[in-house]
Amino acid sequence: MAALHTQPLELPALRAQLRHRLTAGNLPQMPLRLGRPAQTWTAPRRPPAEVLVRDGSLVSW
């Protein structure tokens, strides 16, 4: 999983701290968090035949 976080960079003090500690004086663009989730969820999905359309009509599988 990946998570993008831009809100911390909106705080001048935190932005300066990140610049000093993590980017060797360069301007930080966006903190990126990578890792494995402890728990995952699945989203409900409709079958493809209900949503695929070709030439104005539903595609049969």
Image (spheres, grey):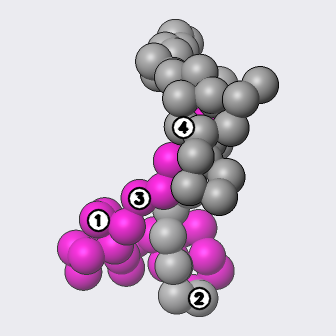
Of tags 2 and 3, the one toward the viewer is: 3
Residue indicated by mark 2: 26
Circle 4 packing at 10 Å, graded few (<14), some (14-19), many (20+), is few
Q: Residue 51 carries which label?
A: 4
Question: Any magenta on residue 14?
Answer: yes
Residue at x-position 65% and y-position 58%: 55
- For the residue marked with disc 4, what is the amino acid? Val
Distance between mark 1 and mark 2 Cα atoms: 18 Å
Residue indicated by mark 3: 5
Instruction: Tell me which numbered mark, 4 or 2, is placed earlier along the sequence.
Output: 2
Distance between mark 2 and mark 3 Cα atoms: 18 Å
Q: Tell which of 6 and 41 is nearer to you.
A: 41
Of tags 4 and 3, the one toward the viewer is: 4
Picture quadrant where residue 60 is located? top right
Q: Where is residue 18 in the image (x, y as percent from the top left)?
A: 46, 69
Instruction: Tell me which numbered mark, 2 or 3, is placed earlier along the sequence.
Output: 3
Picture quadrant where residue 15 is located? bottom left
Instruction: Tell me which numbered mark, 4 or 3, is placed earlier along the sequence.
Output: 3
Of tags 1 and 4, the one toward the viewer is: 4
Residue indicated by mark 1: 7
Residue at x-position 22% and y-position 73%: 11
Distance between mark 4 and mark 2 Cα atoms: 47 Å
Instruction: Tell me which numbered mark, 1 or 2, is placed earlier along the sequence.
Output: 1
* Range shown magenta: 1-25
Distance between mark 4 and mark 3 Cα atoms: 33 Å
Quadrant of the image for the N terminus?
A: top right
Tag 1–tag 2 contact (CB < 8 Å): no
Tag 4–tag 2 contact (CB < 8 Å): no
Distance between mark 1 and mark 4 Cα atoms: 36 Å
> Could you tell me if residue 33 is visible in this image?
no
